Image: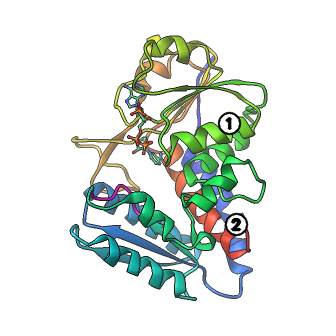
Amino acid sequence: MSTLILDGRATRDALIPGLMKRVQALSYVPTLAIIQVGDRPDSTAFIRAKKAFAKKIGIGEKHIQTTETVSQSELIDIIKECNADKGIHGIIVQLPLPIHLDRDAVIDAIEPKKDVDALTAWSVKRWLEGREDAIMPATARGIRTFLKMYKIDLFGKKVTVIGRSMLVGKPLITMCLNENATVTVCHSKTPDLAKETKWADVLIVAAGKQGLIQAKHVKRGQVIIDVGINSVTGEKLDDEIEGVRLVGDVDFEKVSKKVAAITPVPGGVGPMTVFSLFENLVDLCAGMN
Ligand code: NAP
C-alpha cells in the first residue's frame, strides 16, 4: 500500500476561508505584535512567514525589533506598551531569546488575554487542565487540527512524543492526553529510542535533530508527524521560508517507504502551526482565554 503524505499546505489552504470569515466578522482589524530580540536568521525567516500569512488573511501585524543587547526591563517595557495598546490584540515574543534574558519573566509580562503563544503561566495552567476554552500553543493545536482533517483519531491510540520542551513537547503531550491517547514521552536521556518509537501507532518527533528517526525506529502502519525544523546548507530553497533549506528530524526518504502516513518538511506541520497561531489570535479577539 502506498504511503499517505500529510499535506500541511493543502490542509491549511482548505481551512483559510473559514478563518477569514471569522476575521471579517470582527468590527476591527485584529493585529498581532511580534517582538523580536536581535536578528537571528531563523527567527527572521519564521517572522517573515507569519507576516505573509497575516497579510493573506487580513490580519494586521506590528513587528518590533530590538537590539540583541536589550535589557530585561527595556524588553518588559515594550511588552507593557503592547499590553496597554488597544490597537494590538495579540503579542508574541519570538523565541529563543538571548541567554542574558529571563524567558519566563519576559513571557509572563504578556497580558494573558493577548497571549497568542499560550505560554504565560496563566495560559499554561488552562491548557494543562484541558479546559475547552483554553488557548493551546500553536504547534499542538495545528497538529490536532491536521490529524482531524485527515480523520486520524488519537482516541485510544498509542502515541510516542519525542521532546519535552515547554514550547513544543509538553503542549503536544498534553494535547494527545486530552484526545485520550496513551502517551509515551522520550527525550535525550531515553536509553532505547527505537523500542519506544516502534511501540506507537502515532509517532510525533520534536527534537530538532536532523536524521534522528531512521527506518529502524518505525514499523509498518504507523503515522509519523515530524515537527523538527533543521536548517541545512543546500541549493533547494523552501518556497515559503526564503533563503533556508529545511529538513525535519525524520529521514523522510527511508521512513516514508515503510509507514502508513507521514508529514514532509517543509510543507507538513509548519504551515499548520502558522495557521493555528492566527486561529489563537482570532479566538482571543472573540474573548476566549
Ligand atoms: P528544544 O527546546 O531544543 O527541545 C528539544 C527536545 O528534544 C528536548 O526535550 C530534548 O530532550 C529532545 N531531544 C534532543 N535530542 C534528542 C535525542 N537525540 N533523542 C531524543 N530526544 C532528544 O526544541 P523545541 O523548541 O521543543 O523544538 C523542537 C523542534 O521543533 C525544533 O527543530 C524546532 O525548530 C521545531 N519546531 C517546529 C515547529 C513547526 O511548526 N514545525 C514549531 C516550533 C518548533 P531533553 O529534554 O532531554 O533535552
111 or 173: nearer the viewer: 111
- Amino acid marked by disc 1: Cys
Q: Which residue is mark 2?
A: 289
Residue depicted at x 53% and y 86%: 84
Instruction: Specify the quadrant of the image occupied by residue 112.
Output: bottom right
Compared across the picture, whether 116 is left or right of 107 comes to: right
Quarter occupied by the N terminus: top right
Prevailing SS of the magenta stretch: loop
Give the class, few, some or many, for how many residues have Cα within 10 Å of label 1's Cα (few <14, many ≥20).
Answer: many
In the depicted structure, whether residue 174 falls above or below residue 46:
above
Ligand 1 visible in quadrant: top left
Tell which tag, 1 or 2, sits nearer the viewer. 2
Which of the 4 image quadrants contains residue 134?
A: bottom right
Q: Earlier in the sequence, mark 1 or mark 2?
A: 1
Which residue does the image show at 52% across and 11% down from the upper left? Answer: 195
Q: Which residues are magenta?
A: 94-98
The question of residue 126 being in magenta is answered with no
Give x and y (percent) for residue 180. 77, 33
